[in-house]
Image (cartoon, rainbow, N blue to C red):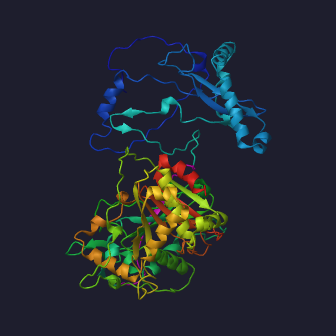
Amino acid sequence: MVKPAEETPRRWIWLSNLDLVVSNMHTPNVYFYRPTGSGFFDSTILKEAHKKPSPRPALPLMILEISHPLLTRKLIPVDWSGGIHSFPSWWLRFTPLCGRPIALAGELRSEPNRSAENRIRDALKRSDNEYVPSAIDYLEQQNDLSALARGPNTFKCPNLAIVGSGCRSTRLILGGVGPFTWAQVWGPVVIIKKGKMVTINVKESTMVKPAEETPLRPLWNSNVDIVVPSMHTPSVYFYRPTGASNFFDPTILKQALSKALVPFYPMAGRLRRDDDGRIEINCNAEGVLFVEAETNSVIDDFGDFAPTLELRKLIPTIDYSGGIHSYPLLVLQVTYFKCGGVSLGVGMQHHVADGFSGLHFVNTWSDMARGLDLTIPPFIDRTLLRPRDPPQPAFHHIEYQPAPPMKSPRQNTDTTTVSIFKLTRDQLNKLKAKSKEDGNTISYSSYEMLAGHVWRSVCKARALPVDQDTKLYIATDGRSRLQPPLPPGYFGNVIFTTTPLAVAGDLMSKPIWYAASRIHDALLRMDNDYLRSALDYLELQPDLSALVRGAHTFRCPNLGITSWVRLPIHDADFGWGRPIFMGPGGIAYEGLAFVLPSSANDGSLSVAIALQTEHMKAFEKLLYDF
């Protein structure tokens, strides 16, 4: 119990009518802070500071007006701490007043959105310096102020209350450890923009091992297996219920998983370093993690399936603190929703497999759950990607050069927003038609036009200087580009990086097809000679870890785009139908984007992207403006 550090006045404080008509409860608030290092939120410092007089004037809270039972009323709180001229700015009281637009529900549904906006605006205008004292006088004439207190009956259907986060009492709350950060919160009162905060209850965790004896040996990693981020790539599948009594029966799933791990035995191993310190896979059959979980949420709580932190809860968390040998290379989580649906969260260590090989495994597992046999056996020999002896790099590999920095440093911001945007077939056709503008005669693919448009839009959203260099990193599968082509079941990473470079001013001022042309020309260079040269170039580098892509690679003014359009991401049918959605379970870095196909085969594509929060709104507008 923290008490004042000094003597304070011992007296009664009179409560105004406005103080009395609020709900008799403690208003809950939560602040979130990012870690900063030692001394972070020292309890002694906090308790001592709590005893001292506050140097910041206390700001009033906001509550809501009561509603009329016969109409629907939208309630907008008004902060009157500085709006009533006779009140000093430090007035420590509740000043609960609000605008109260009233409308018939039918009118709101049938009229344009701006009609509702006008009603709100008009109601707010009425809450002026004359209206507020009148409200105080009105309360004085009431016999029982407790009858006017707001509660569950106030805001329930057909009425609505909205509390905005723009009030001054929620801005710039600073302490010795830094500013607070907003997080999504779900409770009986607070509504968040993109769904609920999901609570996951783990029922059981099992380490599933191969069903038969498998080779116990080290597996050498190629240079392109080494230069990927040392993390588990997250992805999530969602399935609607079918009514089957054995819908996503964990026994069926684990038995099929154990069977699939026999041909894909490296997946059941662990990472380790060889005598030279190079990362390899120790095929020791220790198994993969299979988690069974449940939640009171429903699939629709995830809205458009944007890869937010909430979505990340559907994938097991990896503890990397024990070293690379300590964690499974594959972690799986089957989450059962209240609606009867299921999600499958997958975390796959990137040194083990790229997207193509990872999907080969997951789709084989799903086939075996349906009783099917292995169709394409994995080819487990990565020496096909050994460099030449001696190495003979023949090109200047810009993809492994440092990313262009900002010419004019900006204020650092750690606030990143992740969003997903859908483009219909018609929108994509309209975008591709832009390739014929201004007399251009070269045909660019739909992907080149979309990627160019995203690159161009991001440059504009970031308001890059016209002389700013910007590099685009495009993940490029080398399987069909190498000669001879790799075997169909090659298991490992074959991802190279295409990196067109441009000046932001050119991208922003020239037609969309100009950005597509930069991408088109860069992709043409990615042939067998260039890829073999890349393998040789990597072999000559003293420290491959210095070339690993990360936050420094994609951040402003640069961008990364990974396309899953040609990957079989919707083929994982475990016996209860194909997924309604499959996509990334998170985006680790600002400036990284994914292009996803639709599960409905309707020709639409979605762009999932992480950008600084201040840039995301502008990007959304620019993405659809063509």
Residue 604 shows in this picture: no
Residue sitting nearer the eye, 232 or 48: 232
Q: Which is the main secondary structure of the residues drawn in magenta?
A: loop
- Name the residue located 31 percent from the left edge and 27 percent from the top edge: 48
Residue 31's image quarter? top left
Q: Is residue 346 magenta?
A: no
Magenta residues (range): 194-214
Furthest-left residue in this view: 275
Is 165 above or below relative to 21?
Answer: below
In the rendered structure, the answer to whether residue 118 lies left or right of residue 295 reads: right
Residue 132: x, y in percent? 64, 18
Residue sitting nearer the eye, 425 or 243: 425
Q: Is residue 206 magenta?
A: yes
Residue 149's image quarter? top right
- Name the residue located 45 percent from the left edge and 74 percent from the top edge: 523
Residue sitting nearer the eye, 312 or 476: 476
Is 430 above or below relative to 298?
Answer: below
Is 282 above or below relative to 344?
Answer: below
In the rendered structure, the answer to whether residue 587 lies left or right of residue 339 reads: left
Furthest-front residue in this view: 439
Residue 11: x, y in percent? 45, 10
Residue 470: x, y in percent? 41, 59
Locate the N terminus and report the quarter of the image it occupies. Answer: top left
Locate the C terminus and report the quarter of the image it occupies. Answer: bottom right
Is 468 above or below relative to 382?
Answer: above
Residue 383: x, y in percent? 32, 84
Residue 623 shows in this picture: yes
